[in-house]
Amino acid sequence: MVDFQFEADRGRLIKPINSLARCAGILLVVTAGAADCEGGFPLAGSYIQNRPCKGDGSDPAELQVKISPREIVSKVSSCTFQKVRQHENIIEAQVECQFPTGPLVGNVFFTVRQDGTISFVDRDQNYRAILYRCSNRDAPNSG
């Protein structure tokens, strides 16, 4: 199991190197700018919900999702990662989302599937989606 802990005051993501390093208290610091590098935050990227990314500018804005080591941004809300844990292909995250009615804290689960898509569900199973990663060349416009 890999734990990712976010230091909100420093804008950094902390990731234990391995169990030996965890026991020794040695941590590898991965900055948000290096998240796309190998060993960075595994979910970082641009996605389309419930359909493959076209990347030609025709992907609907309401289906676009961007995930960074710090947050999830979609048309519905912006959610900040509070705590993230990974066990094999499942990533559990505690997030704080900003809505017009106020903030909401909850847990969400990402499952990396064999076909390369990511299954997303909130803890209460009120919302489910399949996220299709957009390559750099076909990422949706940030418009």
Image: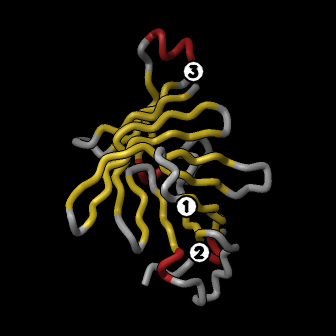
Who is closer to the viewer here, 57 or 136?
57
Q: Residue 25: percent from the left, percent from the top? A: 41, 14
The C terminus lies in quadrant = bottom left
Location of the N terminus (image quadrant): top right
Where disc 1 sits, the SS reads: strand
Q: Earlier in the sequence, mark 2 or mark 3?
A: 3
* Foreground pick, 49 / 140: 49
Q: Is residue 3 above or below residue 66?
A: above
Q: Which residue is mark 3?
A: 18
Q: Earlier in the sequence, mark 1 or mark 2?
A: 1
Numbered disc 3: secondary structure: loop
Classify residue 40 as left or right of residue 26: right
Residue carrying label 1:
45
Hey, what amino acid is under mark 3? Asn
Number of the label disc, if any, that sits on residue 139: 2
Estimate the spatial distance between the alpha carbons at disc 2 and disc 3, rounded to whole Å: 33 Å
Query: For the point 57% across and 21% down, which residue is it?
Result: 18
Please report contact status of discs 3 and 1: CB closer than 8 Å, yes or no.
Answer: no
Residue nearest the observer in this picture, 126 or 49: 126
Kindly identify the residue that appears in the image at 55 percent across and 12 percent down. Answer: 20
Quadrant of the rendered structure where residue 119 is? bottom right
Disc 3 crowd, CA 10 A, few/some/many (<14, 14-19, 20+): some
Amino acid beneath label 1: Gly
Q: Amino acid at mark 2?
A: Ala
* SS class, disc 2: loop
x, y percent for residue 126? 48, 56
